[in-house]
Image: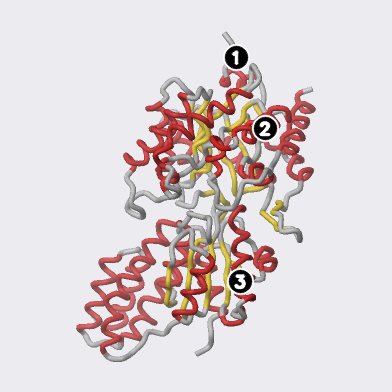
């Protein structure tokens, strides 16, 4: 039997991919176009991006489905195509994944709040996420990756939904934290300790953080997370803050070299699974792959 | 209950995000014939200021900010009709037209800024999310706004904030409004680049910024 992603995590540092949205934009995704629509309209482009990440050294890439929950799709009148857009996202990545490499089904937040602050119940969120997770599983992903969560209650709803819809797949969850004078918190005020404990209890097979922080700041957060769990830890930092060049193109403030400089420290701090987030591209992943292999050589 | 105790309870109701309490206390103030402008200034405003401090200290988060802003709204909903009846007006920081920029459907942060501005004494016209550039200008012109506040969560949509500033310039309307930008990818540097008048990192800072730029009346 072939090696599973969980086996690989036990053996060595696992490398994920970097940003998808900016890669699509660089290939002409028009303003206002929902990125997931290109799974159907421009599958060649989506596959080229996945292929570039695999070539750069990613062990696992994330599907182009971050925003493809029924709730978000409804803003674009696409909610009737939830299964199609997610299933296709999974198949596109699967088709270009070399043997021994993996595909994570990406599930982002709904962008809406739970009661009493918003209109939705946890049961509603759970079934929305279950639908998305089920379609990704049908497209043969290896893992479900619930990403960029800012509300622990939503993350737990997603985790329950994913496990219900795809009971045979491992589910990973990353939350997004920022630092305030008292430590690291989600926007809703959930602490690192509480998030990791509850996610573990609900059956997450790996947990961690992505977005918001740059790679230097992320090392501090990984240290804090390592004290709270024995689960494999995921760390996907942003390349700093977006900056707009004189040509109107959007770049990011933390350059490649500075970003990658902190990779060994992330791993020392306890990260088992690393990858990029906003502002990263295949060049970042390639440099990260080199940094990781130097470390283990 | 004397007036000072009454004010203290109002402050607490806002800090605790107790909308029912804030509304009830406002009703009592009306019945007791208190000076309602003073009620706002000495009862409720210190509450929302305290909420801002607690947020800055890392004690309060998004849920607390939202409940406190809602409590403030509940109080104002009782007080405003009474003020109008006696032809008085609560001190306003100015008129704000706010929305998430064209192409971007994310509205959690924008809603929070909108609520906090309202709680901070601004008259807010919230256009929602994915708002066409044209619509911001139409509304600002129609209500005689002082501020146009633009939100964007995505790197892909933040560029539309700059386009709005360009559109204002084209129409010779740029000097009529203060344009403020915010959202995860925004920064002071971006505000400068986009030709905006200011940037705030969060809802509490946004209220401070708007107050510092508010027209003197």
Which residue position is annotated with label 3?
B167
Q: Residue furthest left?
A: B31
Please tell me which residue lies in front, B84 or B146: B146
Residue A64 appears in which quarter of the rendering?
A: top right
Residue under numbered circle 2 = A48
- The quadrant in which the N terminus of chain B is found is bottom left
Pointer 1: what residue? A3
> Are circles 2 and 1 on residues that touch, CB within 8 Å?
no
Q: Evaluate whether label 3 is on the same chain as label 1.
A: no
Rendered image: mark on residue A136: none
Instruction: For label 2, count other residues whose C-alpha is less than 10 Å away and answer few (under 14), some (14-19) or many (20+).
Output: some
Q: Disc 3 versus disc 1: distance between alpha carbons?
A: 57 Å
- Expressed as whole percent of the image width and height from the top left, the position of residue B60 reads 45, 59
Q: Nearer the viewer, residue A218 or A77?
A: A77
Q: How is the image coloured?
A: secondary structure
Near mark 1 (Cα within 10 A), the count class, few <14, some 14-19 or many ≥20, is few
Instruction: Determine the secondary structure under disc 1.
Output: loop
Alpha-carbon span between mark 3 and mark 2: 37 Å
Q: Position of residue A288 (x, y in %)?
A: 74, 34
Task: Of the two numbered discs 2 and 1 on the same chain, state the one appearing first in sequence.
Answer: 1
Compared across the picture, whether B2 is left or right of A165 comes to: left
Tag 3: Cα neighbours inside 10 Å, few (<14), some, or many (≥20)?
some
Chain containing the residue with disc 2: A
Say which of marks 2 and 1 sits in front: 2
Callout 1: chain? A
Q: Secondary structure under badge 2?
A: helix
Q: Secondary structure at mark 3?
A: helix
In the image, is residue A226 above or below residue A139?
Answer: below
Residue at point 60% right, 36% down?
A42
Asked if one can make out residue A192 in the rendered structure from this viewpoint, the answer is yes
Q: Chain of mark 3?
A: B
Q: Considering only vertical position in the picture, is B32 above or below B189?
A: below
């Amino acid at each position: 039997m072939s090696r599973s992603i969980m086996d690989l995590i036990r053996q060595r540092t696992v490398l994920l991919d970097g940003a998808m949205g900016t890669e699509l934009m660089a290939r002409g995704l028009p303003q206002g176009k929902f990125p997931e629509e290109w799974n159907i309209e421009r599958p060649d482009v989506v596959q080229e991006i996945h292929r570039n990440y695999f070539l750069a050294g990613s062990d696992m890439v994330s599907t182009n489905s971050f925003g493809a929950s029924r709730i978000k799709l409804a803003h674009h009148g696409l909610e009737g195509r939830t299964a199609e857009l997610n299933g296709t996202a999974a198949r596109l990545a699967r088709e270009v994944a070399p043997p021994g490499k993996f595909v994570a089904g990406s599930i982002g937040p709904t962008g809406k709040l739970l009661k009493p602050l918003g209109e939705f119940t946890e049961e509603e969120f759970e079934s929305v996420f279950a639908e998305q997770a089920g379609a990704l599983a049908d497209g043969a992903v290896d893992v479900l990756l619930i990403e960029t969560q800012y509300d622990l209650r939503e993350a737990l709803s997603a985790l329950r939904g994913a496990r219900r819809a795809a009971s045979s797949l491992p589910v990973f969850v990353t939350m997004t934290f920022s630092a305030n004078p008292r430590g690291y918190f989600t926007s809703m005020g959930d602490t690192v300790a509480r998030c990791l404990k509850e996610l573990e209890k609900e059956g997450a097979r790996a947990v961690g953080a992505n977005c918001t922080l740059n790679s230097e700041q992320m090392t501090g957060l990984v240290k804090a997370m390592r004290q709270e769990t024995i689960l494999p830890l995921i760390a996907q930092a942003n390349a700093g803050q977006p900056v707009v060049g004189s040509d109107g193109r959007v770049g990011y403030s933390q350059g490649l070299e500075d970003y990658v400089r902190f990779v060994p420290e992330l791993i020392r701090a306890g990260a088992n699974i690393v990858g990029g987030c906003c502002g990263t591209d295949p060049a970042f992943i390639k440099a990260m792959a080199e940094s990781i292999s130097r470390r283990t050589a | 209950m004397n007036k000072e105790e009454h004010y203290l309870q109002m402050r607490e109701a806002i800090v605790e995000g107790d909308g029912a309490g804030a509304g009830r206390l406002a009703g009592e103030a009306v019945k007791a014939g208190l000076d309602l402008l003073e009620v706002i200034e000495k009862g409720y405003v210190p509450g929302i200021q305290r909420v801002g401090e607690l947020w800055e200290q890392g004690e309060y988060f998004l849920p607390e900010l939202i409940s406190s802003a809602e409590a403030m709204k509940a109080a104002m909903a009782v007080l405003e009709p009474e003020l109008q009846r006696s032809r008085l007006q609560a001190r306003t920081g100015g008129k704000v037209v706010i929305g998430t920029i064209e192409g971007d459907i994310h509205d959690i942060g924008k809603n929070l800024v909108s609520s906090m501005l309202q709680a901070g004494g601004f008259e807010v016209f919230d256009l929602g999310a994915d708002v066409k550039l044209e619509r911001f200008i139409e509304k600002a012109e129609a209500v005689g706004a002082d501020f146009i506040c633009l939100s964007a969560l995505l790197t892909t949509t933040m560029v539309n904030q700059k386009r709005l500033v360009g559109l204002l310039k084209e129409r010779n309307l740029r000097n009529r409004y203060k344009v403020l930008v915010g959202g995860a990818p925004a920064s002071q540097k971006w505000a400068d680049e986009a030709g905006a008048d200011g940037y705030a990192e969060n809802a509490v800072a946004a209220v401070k910024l708007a107050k510092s730029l508010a027209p003197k009346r």
